[in-house]
Image (spheres, rainbow, N blue to C red):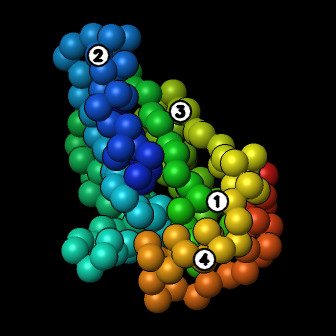
Amino acid sequence: MILLGASNVKMGFPQILTRLRAGAGEPLEILAALGHGRSFGLWSHLLGIRQLPGIVDCRLWDDLGRRPPLPTVALVTDVGNDLLYGASAPQIAGWVGTCLDRLAERGAEIVLTLLPVASLVKVSPVRYHLVRSILFPGRRAASWDAMLESVRELDER
């Protein structure tokens, strides 16, 4: 199993593991690139505590290349986080596309989650700016309307 994502994978990991064990049994090998605020293409920093490379450039790919081919399922999620780092929809789609290509080369069955557009359109501009300023300080803040436009574009890509 390969897990690529950010906070959703990090917070849901115990439940994901339980379901994987129930469905696939043991032994189970999991490779994961995840974490709060994790980016697909940029170095991410969380409250000055830790730094992680973008998923597309992380060690997971080298580790995967050293392993023998096995039946593999991959979950790719949280692709919208990079919008909060100021990346464009085409940039993000390129990074995610590179990850998907690498997984396909390994013959992985891939599950890619879409952005939660229906939920995001309900967020108020005030809440967006508050969360963005706390979790992504120092980043150029796009207007809420511009962010929603980018969300829709990324979801389409």
Which one is earlier in the sequence, the residue at label 3 or at label 2?
2
Q: Quadrant of residue 148?
A: bottom right
Above or below residue 10? Residue 24 is: above
Count up the numbered dots. 4
Query: Which residue does the numbered mark 2 point to in the structure image?
Result: 21
Q: Horizontally, is 102 left or right of 117 in the view?
A: left
Q: Are marks 4 and 2 in contact (CB under 8 Å)?
A: no
Element under label 1?
helix
- The answer to whether one can see residue 61 in this image is no
Cα–Cα span, label 4 and label 2: 39 Å
Q: Label 4 sits on what residue type?
A: His
Q: Nearer the viewer, residue 126 or 13?
A: 126
Foreground: disc 4 or disc 2: 4
Q: Horizontally, is 89 left or right of 36 in the view?
A: right
Which residue shows up at 80% across the image and 67% down it? 149
Q: Horizontally, is 105 left or right of 14 in the view?
A: right
Query: Which residue does the numbered mark 1 point to in the structure image?
Result: 93
Which one is earlier in the sequence, the residue at label 4 or at label 1?
1
Which residue shows up at 58% across the image and 39% down it? 112
Cα–Cα span, label 1 and label 2: 31 Å
Which quadrant, please, contains the N terminus?
Answer: top left
Query: Which residue does the numbered mark 4 point to in the structure image?
Result: 129
Above or below residue 41? Residue 64 is: above
Query: Which residue does the numbered mark 3 point to in the structure image?
Result: 110
Q: Position of residue 12 (x, y in %)?
A: 38, 37
Which one is earlier in the sequence, the residue at label 1 or at label 3?
1
Number of other residues with Cα within 10 Å of mark 3, as a class: few under 14, some 14 to 19, many 20 or more: some
Which residue shows up at 24% across the image and 22% down it? 28
Q: Label 3 sits on what residue type?
A: Ile
Q: Position of residue 129 (x, y in %)?
A: 60, 77
Cα–Cα span, label 1 and label 3: 16 Å
Element under label 2?
helix
